[in-house]
């Protein structure tokens, strides 16, 4: 069986790329197809693979300005020749599922999210653009939505990275899906480290992550907050933050891991499709205080943290008050056990089960 893995772009190592890594471990001989690639930013495992790029790779500044090439991406994807591949696994968040396969090939789409910038986050993304960018989004988004919906018919089966994403797949594509949570490197963390007196907020500092909510809540309460990450809102939030809020900027993984292992709790104020960071916090023995929406409803269970109902300063601070009033707190060993349900081993097992089942159904003789 010849296998192709299609990923939207390979220019960093984040959650989507970690999924591609695990797919490569499942299928070591698989070839990777991606719109643009910066090999210097990839893990050794991905660097060792055969990677095919699209014509977008030849455009000046492709690995830096790939998001501006969105209107060209459908054309680029459909140029990939996948006729020799028996199994195609597309990793979808940017456009990836729109490739053209053989009629008898099995196409499984692992969907991190339907494209946010043309669907439910359209107005959020557009609001961060200038006048020209907004005009371009208004022109190109409608045909991209049509293309996105029609290419869902090219997929034989969807796997969703959370039940939240599964509902969005049903809403936008009218397709069922199997929930398979993404892999989390839970064994990279030590839950036995002593805790310090600070809370942690980490990730991209962009509007939908709602780091601004965390900063304002901690400004009012005076509690100590450490923020790790960078993004469009970082400089503005630094100017508004009180002396109890510390911004560390972008930090490599060992620094993030150290803070997860020492913080009182992780603050997670945005809505995420799944959210790997809360599971990493649990693996490090830290409870999570999360907004009650999206993937947090599946990961931040009662034994793992507290969910607050509204994206407001008052709601977050009330959750912090409840957290600090808990007499027993949260058991780090229990947090770690809960995180194990989202391990890389579990991801590979469930993907194998899904693909094996789909192949068996195809091989079964039809009635009549």
Image (spheres, rainbow, N blue to C red):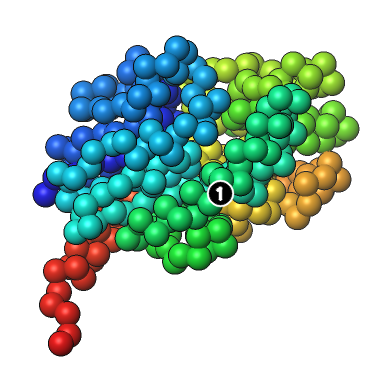
Residue pictured at 76% horizontal, 25% vertical: 131
Quarter the C terminus occupies? bottom left
Residue 123 versus residue 102: which sits nearer the camera? Answer: 102
Horizontal side of 11 relative to 194 (left or right) equals left
Horizontal side of 302 relative to 188 (left or right) equals right
Residue pictured at 17% horizontal, 51% vertical: 86
Q: Quadrant of residue 278?
A: top right
For disc 1, the marked residue is: 145
Give residue 47's position: percent from left, percent from top: 26, 22
Crowding around mark 1 (Cα neighbors within 10 Å: few <14, some 14 to 19, many 20+) is some
Residue 196 versus residue 245: which sits nearer the camera? Answer: 245
Residue pictured at 26% horizontal, 49% vertical: 101
Residue 182 versus residue 51: which sits nearer the camera? Answer: 51
Residue 197 visible at all: no
Identify whether 289 is placed above or below 232: below
Identify whether 238 is placed above or below 185: above
Residue pictured at 43% horizontal, 39% vertical: 74
């Amino acid at each position: 069986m010849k296998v192709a893995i299609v990923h939207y772009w390979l220019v960093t190592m984040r959650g989507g790329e970690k999924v591609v890594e695990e797919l490569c471990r499942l299928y070591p001989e698989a070839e990777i197809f991606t719109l643009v690639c910066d090999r210097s930013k990839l893990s050794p495992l991905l660097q060792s693979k055969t990677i095919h790029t699209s014509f977008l790779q030849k455009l000046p500044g492709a690995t830096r300005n790939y998001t501006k090439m969105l209107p060209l991406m459908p054309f680029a994807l459909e140029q990939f020749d996948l006729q020799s591949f028996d199994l195609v696994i597309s990793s979808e968040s940017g456009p990836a599922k729109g490739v053209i396969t053989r009629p008898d090939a099995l196409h499984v789409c692992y969907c991190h999210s339907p494209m946010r910038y043309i669907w439910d986050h359209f107005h959020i993304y557009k609001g961060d653009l200038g006048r020209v960018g907004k005009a371009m989004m208004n022109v190109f988004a409608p045909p991209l939505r049509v293309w996105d919906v029609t290419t869902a018919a090219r997929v034989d089966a969807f796997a969703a990275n959370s039940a939240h994403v599964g509902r969005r797949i049903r809403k936008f594509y009218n397709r069922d899906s199997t929930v398979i949570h993404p892999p989390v490197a839970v064994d990279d963390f030590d839950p036995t480290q002593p805790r310090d007196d600070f809370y942690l907020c980490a990730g991209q500092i962009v509007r939908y992550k709602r780091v601004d909510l965390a900063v304002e809540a901690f400004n009012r309460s005076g509690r100590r907050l450490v923020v790790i990450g960078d993004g469009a809102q970082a400089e503005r939030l630094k100017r508004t933050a009180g002396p109890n809020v510390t911004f560390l900027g972008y930090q490599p993984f060992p620094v993030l891991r150290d803070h997860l292992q020492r913080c009182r709790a992780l603050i997670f104020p945005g809505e995420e499709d799944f959210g790997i960071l809360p599971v990493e916090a649990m693996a490090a023995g830290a409870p999570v205080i999360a907004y009650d929406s999206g993937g947090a409803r599946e990961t931040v269970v009662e034994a793992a943290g507290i969910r607050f109902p509204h994206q407001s300063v008052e709601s977050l601070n009330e959750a912090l008050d409840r957290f600090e009033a808990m007499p027993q707190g949260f058991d780090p060993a229990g947090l770690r056990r809960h995180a194990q349900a989202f391990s890389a081993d579990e991801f590979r097992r469930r993907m194998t089960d899904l693909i094996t089942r789909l192949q068996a159904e195809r091989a079964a003789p039809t009635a009549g």
